[in-house]
Amino acid sequence: MPDMLVKLYELPPHAPLIDQLAAQGITVRRALAPEKHKIVEWVRANFSARWASECDVAMTGRPPGCFIAVDEKDESKELVGFACHDATCKNFFGPTGVLESQRGKGIGKALLLAALHAMREQGYAYAVIGGVGPADFYAKSVGATIIEGSTPGIYKGMI
């Protein structure tokens, strides 16, 4: 899977989408350090051990490089999605995932935009989306373009 490049200085606004989700009881926010164990366990259980490892690293940043989506309609506060940046490499977005039952609501796009806006606020002009799956989603959401010759990229030789 190739990497993609995003111009952070041309991002669409993220507040309207985050507000729309909040009206539905879904909060998108930066993760807090005390939540690390729950988030990493959830990523491992719902996605993969590799993504959990990357999420673990993203959570060690100050502030954490992990954003979460939480369904707060009832008191259980169910985690429904996550997005990380600066995990495997500096200036890289990912991994990210939304529970299959929650897809199609804009949660993935809100998490993507929240993380990319945070990267821009850190001073990055561009971001790399590493080893993308849904290239059309990233192209449509943030104007990301394929980086030719980037497969397997930094993931070459991984055990």
Image (cartoon, grey):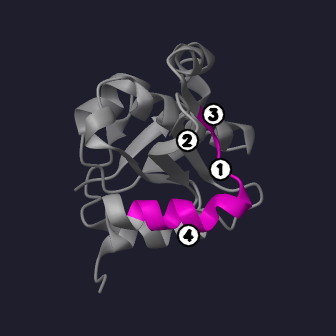
Please tell me whether mark 3 or mark 1 is closer to you in this view: 1
Question: Which mark sits nearer the N-terminus, 4 or 2?
Answer: 4
Find residue 69 and report its horizontal and vertical position in percent. 52, 38
- Identified by mark 4, the residue type is Asp
- Identified by mark 1, the residue type is Ala
The Cα–Cα distance between marks 4 and 2, rounded to whole angstroms, is 21 Å
Q: Which residue is depicted at the point 50% across and 36% down?
A: 111
In this picture, which residue range is highlighted in magenta? 28-43
* Local SS, label 4: helix
Q: Dots 3 and 1: beta carbons under 8 Å?
A: no
The residue labelled by disc 3 is 117
- Identified by mark 3, the residue type is His
Location of residue 111 with respect to 66 vertically, above or below:
above
Please tell me whether mark 1 or mark 2 is closer to you in this view: 2
Please tell me whether mark 3 or mark 4 is closer to you in this view: 4
Find residue 68 and report its horizontal and vertical position in percent. 55, 44
Location of residue 131 with respect to 72 vertically, above or below:
below
- What type of secondary structure mainly makes up the magenta span? helix
The residue labelled by disc 1 is 31
- Identified by mark 2, the residue type is Lys
Which quadrant does the C terminus fall into? bottom left
